[in-house]
Image: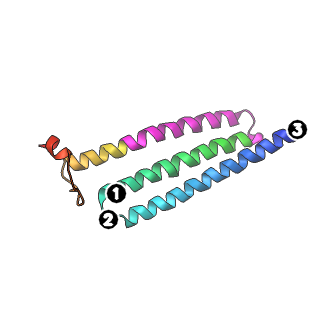
Amino acid sequence: MSSMVLELNYVLFFIGITLTTIGAIFDVIASIGLLRFPEFYVRLHAATIGSIGGAVVPIIGVAILALSCTFLGPQRFFIFGCSIVIAMIIFFVAPVGSHAIARAAYRSRTVVPKYVVHDELRRVRG
């Protein structure tokens, strides 16, 4: 292998490890937010941060790591593609699910928001 390919593999490996570490940091921050935040809706925001930053970013890091692992052979491109598709699915589905949970909790009056100055949804709810 040429030195250019080896240098590219090292750069890809470093980027993948960095993204995986950033994802772990997002998970820690989200778990602290789930424990410390006072209200359901704010905790739901922390959970969404954990699912996006703590799942999507490390999966992209794993995809980049797979590209740098030449010992995987041609399967590394399959791992890369599957990881990117999974990251995109989580990226688009997690906020929608979080919004659906918040809207269902609000409409069923299971959780009453404490710190609302102007409630625009109250007119819609009836």
| Residue 29: % across, % down | 48, 61
The first of marks 2 and 3 along the sequence is 3
Q: Nearer the viewer, residue 101 or 14?
A: 14
Relative to 53, does residue 25 appear above or below in the rendering? below
Q: How far apart are labels 1 and 3 at the CA level?
A: 51 Å
- In the picture, measured across the screen, residue 107 lies left or right of residue 23, that is left
Mark 2 highlights which residue?
38
Q: How many labels does the image show?
A: 3
Q: How crowded is mark 1: few (under 14 residues within 10 Å), some or many (20 or more)?
A: some
Proximity of marks 2 and 3: CB atoms separated by less than 8 Å: no
Magenta residues span 69-96
User: Which amino acid, mark 3?
Assistant: Ser
What label sits on residue 2 in the rendered view?
3
Which SS does the magenta portion mostly show?
Answer: helix
The first of marks 1 and 3 along the sequence is 3
Q: Residues within 10 Å of mark 2 (few under 14, many from 20)?
A: few
**Residue 99, located in which quarter of the rendered image?**
top left
Proximity of marks 2 and 1: CB atoms separated by less than 8 Å: yes
Residue shown at 45%/61% (left/top)?
31
Q: Residue furthest front?
A: 117
| Residue 76: % across, % down | 69, 37
* Quadrant placement of the C terminus: top left
Q: Residue furthest left?
A: 126
Residue shown at 24%/60% (left/top)?
115
Q: Is mark 2 on a helix, strand or loop?
A: loop
User: Which amino acid, mark 1?
Assistant: Val
- In the picture, measured across the screen, residue 19 lies left or right of residue 35, that is right
Q: Which residue lies furthest to the bottom in this view?
A: 36
